[in-house]
Image (cartoon, rainbow, N blue to C red):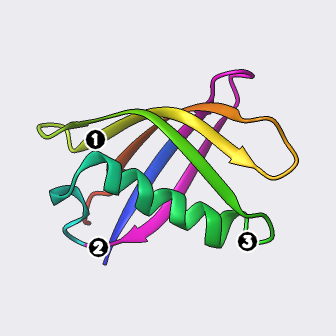
Amino acid sequence: MASYTVRMMDAETGGEGVYKFEGADALFAGTPINIVKAFMDHVDKDELPHQHIEYELNAAFKNEAKTVVTAMGQLILEHLPPIPFMLMVTRDSEV
């Protein structure tokens, strides 16, 4: 398993959160959509365990040279309007 860091910004309020999650060592060998899915699965299970989340992904890009995925979309929570977001996923350096 590898450790990943995500910076997620709320496009409406400008709020920002930094999240850590564990994922497969080869996560970045996959598509940017699968990388975002791995993070959103973490949010659903670990960050917001009492609230089921869904999301709509409008764009996801992977920069191979910098090992970063940038994505835009909206987070869909029960009983709330969709929350537009932008996020960046990176693999943490091994020390």
Residue depth check, mark 3 versus mark 1: number of the one nearer the observer: 3
Q: Percent x, y for residue 68?
A: 28, 41
Q: Which amino acid type corresponds to the residue marked 2 in the rendered image? A: Ala
Q: Which residues are magenta?
A: 8-24
Label 3 crowd (10 A; few <14 / some 14-19 / many >=20): few
Tag 1 secondary structure: strand
**Label 2: which residue?**
24
Q: Which amino acid type corresponds to the residue marked 3 in the rendered image? A: Pro
Q: Residue at x 81, y 53 (%)?
A: 78
**Label 1: which residue?**
68
**Label 3: which residue?**
49
Q: Residue lying furthest left in this view?
A: 65
Image side of residue 94 versus residue 55, left or right: left
When asked about the image quadrant of residue 60, the answer is top left
Q: Residue lying furthest right in this view?
A: 79
- In this rendering, the answer to whether 19 lies above or below 94 is above
N-terminal of the two: label 3 or label 1?
3
